[in-house]
Image (spheres, rainbow, N blue to C red):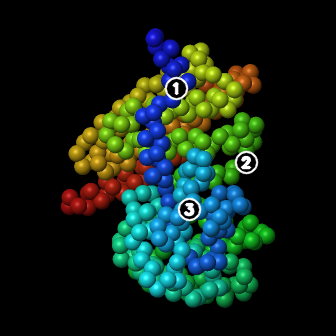
């Protein structure tokens, strides 16, 4: 098999049983939003707002995870995100250890959901005592809901301040907060945009998951339907890239699967001519940059200590970003090919770089923080 035939086989792969383990690993490592709040606090409305699916409800579609929590993966066919809802808060012997274990060692955030007009939060406060004692959960966001049910602005702020103080006293730290009302007629008064931004800061994938920018062209509208699938493959690539040497083989295979899937959506089969056009459109240096990124991040994972901490995290982040960027660029190329349009190489290269760089600021921030921590320890 010559080189061009190998490339075509990469983008039109047969079933790879070895990847089934990788996909299963991804399903076990989904980023988690842990919801903690009393019944009626607005947890279902929060999930509906994030997913855009009004049919989702606590108790509807959620599956048991622990003795005191249920989980829901969204989307269910190729999940990108897992919601964990704590139930049984009113039980006197509630123990958060199992729920904490379900979130441990993953990208996660604890959303404390409280109705602004409900100062009686003893059950939530007791649960927070267990959670704080574990010292496992690092990311918190307090969501004050139903704010417009308190018409008087002064009384509303007093109610929010009171619940905020209850939580911060137990956790012994300042907690980021957002005030929302999911049934507000005026979007500017709802606080939903602020909620989505706050969550995107905690879980960067949500910045892509909830991208509501206007799609000006038909191609952008098409990609909006394909985006969750591309993100799913990006997540699989990241999951495979945590272990040394595994990603070197698995990441290109996953990306080949993604290209094949995207081509199916457009009724196209990759051949050496189409793949050559895509590669040429992305630029002569694309292959060199790609190989260098893949090779260097695998090498970094083998370095003692560094490779087992920041090196592995960096590899996963880069794999996620490059896979998503490749999917974005390929979708654009496939659309233009099926429409008989000329591919603008400069535009396609910009689209690839923009898609990748949008996901990497969080990586750079984490690296800077790690470098600062290492510097403090050495002094």
Of circles 2 and 1, the one toward us is 1
Q: Nearer the viewer, residue 280 or 53?
A: 53
Is label 2 in a helix, a strand or a loop?
Answer: loop
- Mark 3 and mark 2: Cα distance apart in space: 34 Å
Is label 1 in a helix, a strand or a loop?
Answer: loop
Is label 3 in a helix, a strand or a loop?
Answer: strand
Rendering coords of residue 351 (x, y %): 60, 36
Q: Earlier in the sequence, mark 2 or mark 1?
A: 1
| Residue lying at the far left of the rendered structure | 379
- Around disc 3, counting alpha carbons within 10 Å, would you say few (fewer than 14), some (14 to 19), or many (20 or more)? some
Residue 63 is marked as 3
Q: Nearer the viewer, residue 70 or 279?
A: 70
Q: Can you identify the residue that label 1 sits on?
A: 14
Q: Is residue 248 above or below residue 196?
A: above
Q: Earlier in the sequence, mark 3 or mark 1?
A: 1
Rendering coords of residue 187 (x, y %): 74, 66
Residue at left offset 71%, top offset 38% = 222
- Around disc 2, counting alpha carbons within 10 Å, would you say few (fewer than 14), some (14 to 19), or many (20 or more)? few
Residue 214 is marked as 2
Rendering coords of residue 186 (x, y %): 77, 69
Q: Nearer the viewer, residue 150 or 106?
A: 106
Residue at left offset 62%, top offset 70% = 43
Q: Is residue 252 above or below residue 75?
A: above
Q: Earlier in the sequence, mark 3 or mark 2?
A: 3
| Res 85 quadrant in image | bottom right
- Around disc 1, counting alpha carbons within 10 Å, would you say few (fewer than 14), some (14 to 19), or many (20 or more)? few
Q: Is residue 97 visible?
A: yes
Residue at left offset 62%, top offset 67% = 59
Q: How many marks?
A: 3
Of circles 3 and 2, the one toward us is 3
């Amino acid at each position: 098999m010559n080189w061009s035939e190998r490339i075509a086989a990469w983008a039109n792969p047969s079933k790879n049983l070895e990847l089934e383990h990788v996909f299963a690993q991804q399903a076990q490592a989904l980023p988690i939003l842990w919801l903690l709040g009393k019944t009626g606090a607005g947890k279902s409305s929060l999930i509906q707002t994030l997913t855009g699916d009004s049919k989702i409800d606590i108790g509807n579609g959620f599956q048991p995870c622990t003795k005191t929590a249920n989980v829901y993966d969204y989307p269910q066919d190729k999940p990108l995100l897992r919601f964990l809802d704590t139930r049984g808060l009113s039980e006197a012997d509630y123990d958060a250890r199992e729920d904490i274990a379900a979130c441990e060692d993953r990208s996660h955030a604890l959303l404390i959901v409280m109705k602004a007009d409900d100062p009686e939060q003893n059950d939530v406060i007791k649960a927070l005592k267990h959670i704080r004692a574990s010292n496992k959960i690092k990311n918190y966001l307090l969501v004050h809901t139903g704010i417009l049910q308190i018409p008087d602005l002064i009384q509303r702020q007093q109610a929010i301040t009171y619940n905020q103080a209850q939580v911060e006293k137990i956790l012994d730290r300042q907690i980021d907060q957002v005030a929302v009302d999911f049934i507000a007629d005026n979007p500017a008064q709802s606080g939903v945009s602020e909620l989505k931004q706050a969550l995107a800061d905690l879980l960067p994938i949500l910045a892509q998951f909830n991208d509501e920018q206007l799609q000006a062209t038909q191609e952008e509208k098409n990609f909006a339907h394909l985006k969750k699938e591309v993100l799913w493959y990006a997540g699989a690539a990241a999951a495979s890239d945590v272990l040394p040497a595994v990603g070197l083989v698995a990441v290109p295979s996953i990306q080949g699967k993604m290209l094949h899937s995207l081509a199916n959506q457009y009724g196209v089969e990759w051949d050496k001519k189409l793949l050559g056009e895509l590669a040429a459109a992305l630029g002569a240096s694309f292959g060199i940059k790609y190989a260098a990124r893949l090779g260097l991040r695998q090498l970094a994972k083998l370095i003692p200590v560094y490779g087992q901490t920041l090196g592995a995290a960096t590899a996963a982040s880069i794999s996620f970003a490059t896979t998503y960027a490749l999917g974005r660029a390929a979708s654009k190329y496939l659309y233009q090919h099926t429409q008989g349009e000329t591919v603008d190489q400069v535009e396609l290269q910009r689209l690839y770089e923009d898609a990748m760089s949008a996901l990497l600021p969080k990586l750079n921030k984490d690296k800077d923080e790690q470098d600062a921590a290492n510097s403090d320890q050495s002094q």
